[in-house]
Amino acid sequence: MSLTTLPTKALTPLLTLFNNHRTLITGSAVCVAAVFGLSVLSDLIEDYNEWYELGPNGIPLNFFGYIAQKLATPLARTDVRDPIGPYDLAKMSKLYGPIVLTPFLDDMYHDVGEDGEAGLRRRPGERPVVPGYVGPHRQTTQKAPAAIRAKQDAFLHDLAAANPALFEVKPSSLEGPYFNAIWIKDSVPQRDEIKHLHGEFAHPHGEGSTHLVLSLADAATAIEACWAERHRMSGVGNLIPWGFVMIYAPRDDDELEVWKMFIVVSARYALGGETEVKMPSPASPKSSKKN
């Protein structure tokens, strides 16, 4: 029963109470609203500061950039650590071509696990902490040491130097001019999926994590072995491909070798799978070859 349907006699005590204590009741309501508002504002400021601390990226590092990524949040995916759940493989093959189902990792890595099966080994330990912002997409724990981060940039230049007709290193267009990226040269034919990225197939971030594009088969393997997770906007409105993932920052030289492998696998996929990608000398961990 609503107040409008209550008998007048039932409402009278309430009205009398309000009239006798109008100032107190009104003031209390204002105080409750103010406290609630301050709590919401405090949470907003704390969230903004956490977002801001992630550093420069492709989104303006100001309140407008923060609001923009907040508005995109309802569209973003939350199943970024599910290896294959989001995929309709038949539809993906039609969208990107059969190459999207090619496991390039199989040609690159041959560790043998305890079960006797060859394949990508599991990344040791827990996954790093990755805040759930649409952008920037960064990890806040288990960051790469400065020496490893320098080796990442050096490898991009070495890979481009070993394949001068295929690749070049220049500032990222996806992250703004803050980080170097490796690009397929404009003179090299590109599939539509890669054209949509303007030929930029991999770029490391300041803390050592790296965005790159993989085949769906390799993306699923990398995610399942805890080396990666998808970007929250992967496959959403075709902004970025389904195989656009973040490889976690290498913590030591051993993990750096695995990271190099992912860069080369990404390069082979971006080129369409038929073009040989030469590894810089000394080679690590195994030279790329044609399918």
Image (spheres, grey):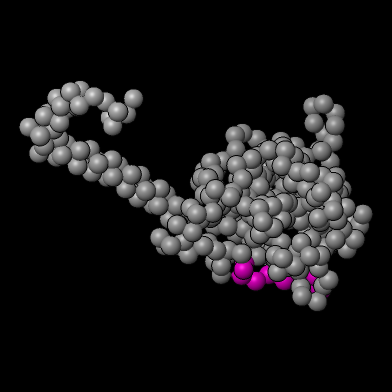
Q: Residue furthest bottom?
A: 187
Residue plotted at (61% across, 45% down): 77
Residue 158 showing in the rendered view:
no
Which picture quadrant has residue 169? bottom right
Taking the magenta stretch, the answer to whether it contains residue 30 is no
Residue placed most toward the observer, 15 or 205: 15
Expressed as whole percent of the image width and height from the top left, the position of residue 160 reads: 75, 68
Which picture quadrant has residue 149? bottom right
Residue placed most toward the observer, 35 or 279: 35
Expressed as whole percent of the image width and height from the top left, the position of residue 115 reads: 82, 26
Q: Residue furthest left?
A: 20
Check the image and report above or below for 226 versus 178: above
Check the image and report above or below for 227 versus 237: above
Residue plotted at (76% across, 56% down): 266
Q: Where's the N terminus, which quadrant?
A: top left
Which picture quadrant has residue 222? top right
Q: Where's the C terminus, which quadrant?
A: bottom right
Residue plotted at (15% across, 39% down): 26
Residue placed most toward the observer, 205 or 100: 100
Residue 121 showing in the rendered view:
yes
Which contiguous range is marked in magenta? Answer: 163-173
Expressed as whole percent of the image width and height from the top left, the position of residue 191 reads: 81, 65
